[in-house]
Image (cartoon, rainbow, N blue to C red):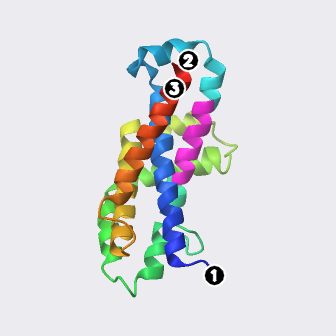
Amino acid sequence: MISINSNIEEITNQGIFLHESYCLWQNLAHPNLNAEYERILCDHEEFKKVFLESLFGSIVTSIYMLCDKRADALSLHCIIAEVESTYPDLREGVEEILSPIDPELELLAQIRHKVYAHRDRNISPQSVFSLVNMSPERIYCCISSILSALDLINWTAGIKSQLGVTTKALSKSDETENSLSTLLL
């Protein structure tokens, strides 16, 4: 059986990877933030399209996985259930962080269910995206809340400092952005 600390570490790393993926997606989806990126990416439209689509699918799937409420899933909810007897206040703290993003999580679940994990034959992916109408800012709000929940879990369990997960995610995202810059410039 895998230890609870190993499970916490695994979902923490998934949260950090999610943040990196989002930052990379944002930089490539909105290259006008960097004129050189835009110039280079114009020459590689097909690569950009495929890469962005796969990144976005990964982002949606990762958010769903981290917030999955099924008892057999490795997720934030699973971790809380496992440590609830040792840290009885943890559930309330994590729910306080995640409950404001419940509407966004429901919308992202629709994208995951109808486009990425299961392809709904009765509706086109474009129609799903139009119905859901999820902005990048709302997606980032979900990711930020997930990182805050991971911070609380790690800090409560004595694994990382109070903002250790968020700090590491920001650092790793900076590294990813620097690597992107090296590749494109």
Residue under numbered circle 3 = 182
Q: Is residue 11 left or right of residue 72?
A: left
Q: Report the magenta residues as a range.
A: 51-62
Q: Where is residue 163 in the image (x, y as percent from the top left)?
A: 31, 59
Between 33 and 94, the one nearer to me in the picture: 33
Among the two numbered marks 2 and 3 on one chain, the one whose residue lies closer to the N terminus: 2
Q: How far apart are marks 2 and 3 (CA)?
A: 14 Å
Q: Residues within 10 Å of mark 2 (few under 14, many from 20)?
A: some
Instruction: Identify whether 5 is placed above or below 119.
Output: below
The residue at 61%/47% (across/down) is 114
The reply to whether discs 1 and 3 touch (Cβ–Cβ < 8 Å) is no
Q: What element carries label 1?
A: loop
Residue under numbered circle 1 = 1
Among the two numbered marks 1 and 2 on one chain, the one whose residue lies closer to the N terminus: 1
Q: Is mark 3 on a helix, strand or loop?
A: helix
Between 52 and 119, the one nearer to me in the picture: 52
Q: In this view, does 118 lie to the left or right of 83?
A: right
